[in-house]
Image (spheres, rainbow, N blue to C red):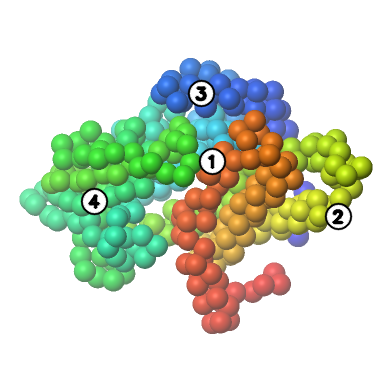
Amino acid sequence: MDFSLSPELSDLRKRTRAFMDELVLPNEGAIVREDRERRHDTLRGLQGKAKDAGLWTPHLPRDLGGLGLGVMGMCVLFREMGRSPIGARVFNCDAPDQGNMDLLLNSAKPSVRERWLAPLARGEITSAFSMTEPAPGAGADPTNLRTSASRDGDEWVIDGHKWYTTGGGDAAFLIVMARTSEDNKRGASMFVVDRNAPGVEHVRDIAVMSEPLLAHREAELRYRGVRVKDDAVLGEIGDGFHLAQLRLVPARLTHCMRWLGLAERTLQLSREYVATRVSFGKTLAHHQAIQKMIATAATGIHAGNLMTFHCASMLQGGDVKNARAYSSLCKNHVARLLCQTLDDAIQMHGGLGYSDDMPFAQWYRGARAARIADGPDEVHDMVIARDFLLGKLELLV
């Protein structure tokens, strides 16, 4: 196994880190403050600079303004961007837009790609993925899907109730999962829906544990007789569950890339503090309890990094089916790692860590969703155990 980077990718990584250090991190507070007022002046300015620097939408092909990087290249850059919760948005590769771009690129009809993908790639609009429903609808078990799409002449009519549609309130378009038959495997389909189409109701943005930030506002939506044409179907009718897996497996991995960046920054900030803070006659860095926290986090970050690279190599090689269990391993490990690293950082900083004078408490409130989003821990544990018990999961790769 060769973990060295090509000269081109190594240069891109250095340029991305420098952009983050010199431009994004110093403006992090301003972007958050402006977003509370629903302004994005600083963000827009940085996005323009990211385009000028040749670091825009690295996951997209060059003909859409991207860098044409594969999943392995994304691993390298997304970790750097993930060192700030607003980093990925600066480069136009944040969730849910990044996964939606890939889905449209690979599954949308030409007319839909032209109408929605092109402006999304340019950063002119945002999008949302509308799948999760209030109970008893689809959650961790997508087969509970209740939203329906029925044929009426040359149109499809969508009716249903969704929530946790991230960014749905401000999105220009929605990718909606709806039931089109009772078939257990091919009973769902995906539709691209104009957010402002008649019958689309934005009920509210759900108040959650973390502060709303940029597109990460959880919308509750109702679809009442929403009509779309055949070209709104992604792939073919009945491809919904299959397309969801094609989107979610890489999406879990890109989440892990960004979370690793934030975990690494958390540990770096903790190192600076424990090296100078004196308690009981010596710096915190000389206390064994602190050293144990540092060692645990460092080991976990490195392990998560290797897991991510391994799963990414499978996806880059086209082995999406077998990568699923490894993406579950990676997602559970990194999500728990991020939460634990932030929790330990708060503990190491004491009252300072619990305050908003440091970013850990805010970051933790957002990070806690990592163990639920894109499949809760328990579902991924089930996938890992199932594949291992069936002899399908090689651990010593």
Q: How far apart are the alpha carbons under marks 3 and 2?
A: 38 Å
Reading the image, the residue beneath label 1 is 59
Q: Which residue is drawn at 9% across and 52% down?
A: 152
Q: Which amino acid does label 3 sit on?
A: Arg
Packing grade of label 2 (10 A; few <14, some 14-19, many >=20) is: few
* In this picture, residue 112 sits left or right of residue 318: left
Position above or below: 146 against 125 = below
Give the spatial CA distance, label 3 vs label 1: 28 Å
Viewer-proximal residue among 328 and 71: 328
Residue type pointed to by label 2: Gln
- CA distance for labels 3 and 4: 32 Å
Which mark is first along the chain, 1 or 3? Answer: 3
Cα separation, mark 2 vs mark 4, equals: 52 Å
Tag 3–tag 2 contact (CB < 8 Å): no
Of circles 3 and 1, the one toward us is: 3
Circle 1/circle 4 CB separation < 8 Å: no
Quarter of the image containing the C terminus?
bottom right
Q: How crowded is mark 4: few (under 14 residues within 10 Å), some or many (20 or more)?
A: many
Q: Which mark is nearer the camera, 3 or 4?
A: 3
Question: What residue does disc 2 label?
Answer: 288
Q: What element carries label 2?
A: helix
Q: Measuring 92% from the left and 42% from the top, which residue is drawn there?
A: 281
**What percent of the width, then of the height, locates residue 217?**
40, 38
Report the amino acid beneath label 4: His
Is the Cβ of the residue at disc 2 closer than 8 Å to that at disc 4?
A: no
Q: Nearer the viewer, mark 1 or mark 4?
A: 4
**Amino acid at dot 1:** His
The residue under label 3 is 33
Q: How crowded is mark 1: few (under 14 residues within 10 Å), some or many (20 or more)?
A: many
The CA distance from mark 1 to mark 4 is 32 Å
